[in-house]
Amino acid sequence: MTTVATHCPYCALQCAQTLTPGPAGVSVSGRDFPTNRGGLCQKGWTSASVLTAADRLTTPLVRGEGGELEPTSWESALDAVALRLREIRAVHGPNAVAVFGGGGLTNEKAYQLGKFARIALGTANVDYNGRFCMSSAAAAANRSLGIDRGLPFPLTDLGGAQAVLLLGSNLAETMPPAVAHLSGARAAGGLVVVDPRVSATAALTDDGAGLHLQPVPGTDLVVLLGLLHVVFAEGLADTAYIDSRTTGVEDARRLAATWWPERVEQVAGVPAARLRETARRLAAASPSRGGRGAYVLTGRGVEQSTQGTATVNAAINLALALGLPGRVGSGYGAVTGQGNGQGGREHGQKSDQLPGYRMIDDPAARAHVASVWGVDPALIPGKGKPAVELLASLGRDDGPRAMLVHGANLRVSAPNSGQVEARLDALDLLVVCDVVPSETAQRADVVLPVLQWAEEEGTMTSLEGRVLRRRKALDAPKGARSELWVWRELAGRLGAPGTWDTEASLVFDELARASSGGRADYGGLSHARLDAEPDLYWPCPTSAGDPHPGTPRLFLDAFPTADGRARFVAVDDRGPADDVHAGAPIHLVTGRVLQHYQSGAQTRRVESLVAAAPEPFVEMHPVLADRHGIVTGDRVTLTSARGAVTAPARVTETVRPDTVFMPFHWGSDGSVNRVTNDATDPVSGMPEFKVCAVSVARADTSSAPTPAGQPSTDWSRTAPAPTPAAAATEVRT
């Protein structure tokens, strides 16, 4: 047996693993690495189970005249897809075809997918599920710091900090190995967690380890404005840093002046005294006051909002006022979620970007990328529609008539998912590449079986900008194919110009050339170099002399802006798009549980994870539950302006009395995204997943739906059929 060093297929922490194939399957062990230090979460330990899922896709499927998906050959499936694409483009134009990608694709596939959309299909309509993940943090970082890299410093730097302010991220459940890097702040009493729930991460502040701020949902921006107010009002700002390294402070200061702590307390529900204490702890930890360092970190809880970009800019403003970014041991960062959420948006999946984080409307960027692709720049389309707008336009007179989906399960993961389901069903052609029959694949016209993480070579980029090698550990089942191969075959059938390599190392070499000179510069990297040096961070440009060493820490000398300075961006609060009102008086917030990942398409096929977290639930405070006559186990219906969802109640004091919480890993009647809001941030296009207004009622148990658990497989457009259970795998923690 040969062991293979690789990385976990799930979140952006990209924990290091060792895979050992054997007669009984693939065994997983943790591998010593700076981010996870040999540890894995339950999902990581059981990650090999999905490789042998009972319903693994191994043959192409095409929907027949009777409405059922039927097995066919690869040649027939690809011929059928190419024919329909040509027909649709001939009648409706190239933008009648859309492409939707995913933040779990390797860098090579993310790059090639963007190229395929724009050159082989000629469409501007390409976006990906990272629009639901990092777009607000990306927009805010670009306009303030000049560059978007989740953590502009190594994760291990957090360990030496005296204080960490963590907003909207439940690391203890989403990235458990990352919690070890908070130990220094906890020991100093400096961990501050902002969350409307007493999450597992918020509980880490107990016993003097820090502070938990529990605001009204949708008021995180107000909290940050209040903290900035205290920093300026109490003379806690690093004025020397502000004067020498930033611009725009006066406008930001004037707006913050209107948010004194007592006003914040009235709006957000966070005591004024606790706001002042938080600001003082952060200031005491800052280098300008002799502290060991402080960090401000944001996550999806504050970013998935119609004012997500403004909220992240407020967090960056606070960090700048304290003099943190660009100093070793301090800074601002966004905790990236998806496995390749960072690399996935750098190389061409976003509707407005080309490889290397080049903007698609920049003539110089278009010329450079076109030269690498071997095409005329005029062939590259302009900006397309961002994800929510794109999905809402599907099947309409002025929208796409066909869509190709790669690495996304839109029927579960998109906001206002009932509308998304209707739009997907309105398409003339839906093609889904996947490894298992996700809810989206089950309703497709063509399903193409592709490779999983341990069956392919490639690279991923972690939340800290480290470019990592993903290595093949075993052969794929007969019939599954690499998406690189799929795109080459379709490009050939469509008569596309350019080269379409199927070997990941060659695609990466082309990616490196296309990104060279861009903000996300991978020009000095290759598979061979990453194999030899597993500690390289972008930007890593080409070098005439010795190879560039990579850039683990950004901003140490200057910010990549026109004048080398970071920018304060003046922002103010306008509240959530769907605030509570008489008909819907309760805030709904959504999030994750430890055992599941994203839409659950993979983790709901692992029996041990399903046993630990078998179905969705509604967390509610005893006061709210008593008001509605609800006890734990009762089925509860939440209704918003967009739809309704029903799940069992969990009565707990860990959530505010004016708030309910649901995780989002389940489909069907247990899909919380049936009620979430698809209103978007005007800057980033991020939908407002994390807060909306709902009514709460005890459900009629006599007509309750079957509890959600493992996914069902519905190959038809009518009746569902059960899926065989995946092989059980022991959970080790």
Image (tube, rainbow, N blue to C red):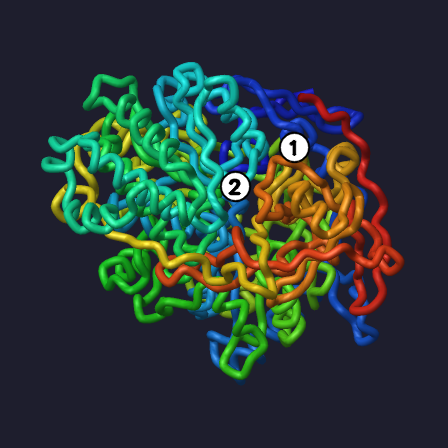
Residue 576 shows in this picture: yes
For disc 2, the marked residue is 196
Q: Quadrant of residue 728?
A: top right
The residue shown at (23%, 59%) is: 364
Q: Secondary structure at mark 1?
A: helix
Q: Residue furthest right?
A: 702
The residue shown at (48%, 64%) is: 679
245 lies left or right of 346: left
Q: Quadrant of residue 20?
A: top right
Residue 370 numbered mark, or none: none
N-terminal of the two: label 1 or label 2?
1
Residue 43 numbered mark, or none: 1
In the rendered structure, which amino acid carries the disc numbered 2? Answer: Pro
Number of dots carrying numbers:
2
Residue 489 shows in this picture: no
Can you give x and y, in whole percent of width and height, for residue 592 in the image?
60, 41
Can you give x and y, in whole percent of width and height, for residue 620 in the image?
66, 44
